[in-house]
Amino acid sequence: MEAVLAGAISTALTRLGVDADPSRIGLERPARTDHGDWSTNAALVSAKGAGLPPRELAQQLAAELDGAGLPHLERTEVAGPGFVNLHLAPSWLHEVLAEVLLEGVDGYACSDSGSGQTVNLEFVSANPTGPLHAGGGRWGAFGDSLARLFRRCGYATVTEYYVNDRGAQMELFGRSLAARLAGEPVPDDGYRGEYVIEWANELAVELEANSAVGDAGPLAVVEARGGTAFAASWGRERALRDVAESLAAMNVGFDRWQSEASLVDSGAMDDVIERLRDAGRVYEQDGAVWLATSEFDDAKDRVLRRSDGEPTYFVPDIAYHHAKFGRGDRVIDVLGADHHGYVPRIAAAMQMLGHAPESYEAIVGQNVTLMRDGKVIELSKRTGTMVEVRELIDAVGPDVARFAFLLQSIDSRQTIDIDLLSAQAAENPVFYVQYAHARIASVARRAEADGVASVPPQGTDLSPLSGDRELALLRALEVLPSVVEIALRERAPHKVTTWVRDLAAAFHGFYHDCPILHSQIPPEVRDARLCLTEGTRIGLAIGLHLLGVDAPEAM
């Protein structure tokens, strides 16, 4: 419809002898429906070239449009200094509903804008040194919903979790586990969380169940199998299992788990260093090997190998990102707020390796502040002051947790009061949305019990849908395809959250004011409203799927 109107405006201006710049002509949705379905600034931006006052040109343009015989256009009006408001008949929204019903959950609001393009999306990637804290749940909810948006728009999408399983933090984690296994305090700079004690006990039970510990005890077995390295390896697997299970409870999964240690063992680090050296970007100074990232807008050059020959963490990161381009034309990282300085150096390295600047993207979000008992909880695995994703899910449920994480833009800091969220779980916005879906399912069940087709045959007359409540629902369904496209383009799943809440509110109002199966409702009105109800169910199911939230049949 927007394309038809834009074409008609351009044609009308040409008939008026106005040479207009199409790039300056806009069509917008007025905030108030009594101002029309669309409004154009065409007269305002073209008046000077036409040699007419804007309002006079607007009146001529409106007259041309009124006489053009455009489908669904009821009338135009001139507003303000020269805007032209376009009022459409409900018939255009009836066509939208017919499209929704025809295409269904799997087809409506899908696009092929990403056809032939591949995306590699990495998110969460917390170190495997403990359970995933609740703040990590935000990255999981955001990243997974973004992947769903990409896929709905036709992009072949691979999601990844980078496992930082080498280096000092893993050794320290292994030492902490081994110390707790021996009943000793952890090292001064070790991991002190209660989970370390719990996991050490799990390790002991596992060793006693699966090996001949005998009188030597589990600690002796750990020492015999490699000591700290064995404890760290066991702890890595335990941590990753916790992460995978916690995120799976929130309907978040990954196509690939990439181990940093295995990447190093593969020789990929040496390969990228040689590639960078061949590109003339590597130099030596003070016994260290440097990468000239400052030539690509980084604040300074970065060390690749220290003077002792050991690679910095930057090298495996470069190798990993370079490898990801084999799994996606566009590589996207979802990063925490403390990674601002990380982005330019990785972007620089990727350009040095021949990847186009626009092919690498980093989304740097803001962290979550968690509160309990009126106090802020610091998220520290080492001190043990943390709230796990599991705890949050146990307290409020996976749908509430995930929906809560997707209420705000990722670039805004979020505060979650766990006590408040738990106490008000029954009033949480996600239940309001899910209740709308469950209500529709109950309508379908009642229709079946009454011997009425819950989805009337194709070709049902939709013209009875002309009341304010009905039109509000139809307008909400009409904008869904553009909401999906905008949410993807702006990397903003929260826009889907806003939309689905608006749709649910519109349905609850419709359900209250517009009887569907009442015995006194004429059959043609009943059938039209049943079609609208099913169209709303399709919209809710699409939105909730994009958010990774359940669409229940009953509550």
Image (spheres, grey):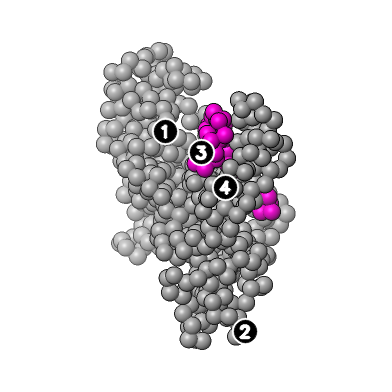
Q: CA distance from mark 1 to mark 4?
A: 50 Å
> Which label number is shown at residue 520?
2
Q: CA distance from mark 2 to mark 4?
A: 41 Å
Q: CA distance from mark 1 to mark 2?
A: 61 Å
Q: CA distance from mark 2 to mark 3?
A: 48 Å
> Which label number is shown at residue 67?
4
Task: Depth check: give the residue in front, 67 or 233.
Answer: 67
Residue range corresponding to the magenta coloring = 7-35
Amino acid on which disc 3 is placed: Thr
Say if residue 391 shows up in the picture. Answer: no
First in sequence: mark 2 or mark 3? 3
* Disc nearest the viewer among 2 and 4: 4
- In the rendered image, which quarter contains the C terminus? bottom right
Categorize mark 2 by other alpha carbons within 10 Å: few (<14), some (14-19), many (20+).
Answer: few
Residue at the spot 38% in from the left edge and 44% down from the top edge: 114
- Which residue is tagged 1? 360
Q: Specify whether 227 is left or right of 382.
A: left
Q: CA distance from mark 3 to mark 1?
A: 41 Å
Residue at the spot 37% in from the left edge and 61% down from the top edge: 206
Q: Quadrant of residue 311?
A: top left
Categorize mark 1 by other alpha carbons within 10 Å: few (<14), some (14-19), many (20+).
Answer: many
Q: Specify whether 516 is left or right of 201.
A: right
Amino acid on which disc 2 is placed: Gln
474 above or below 144?
A: below
First in sequence: mark 2 or mark 4? 4
* Disc nearest the viewer among 1 and 2: 2
Under tag 3, what secondary structure? helix
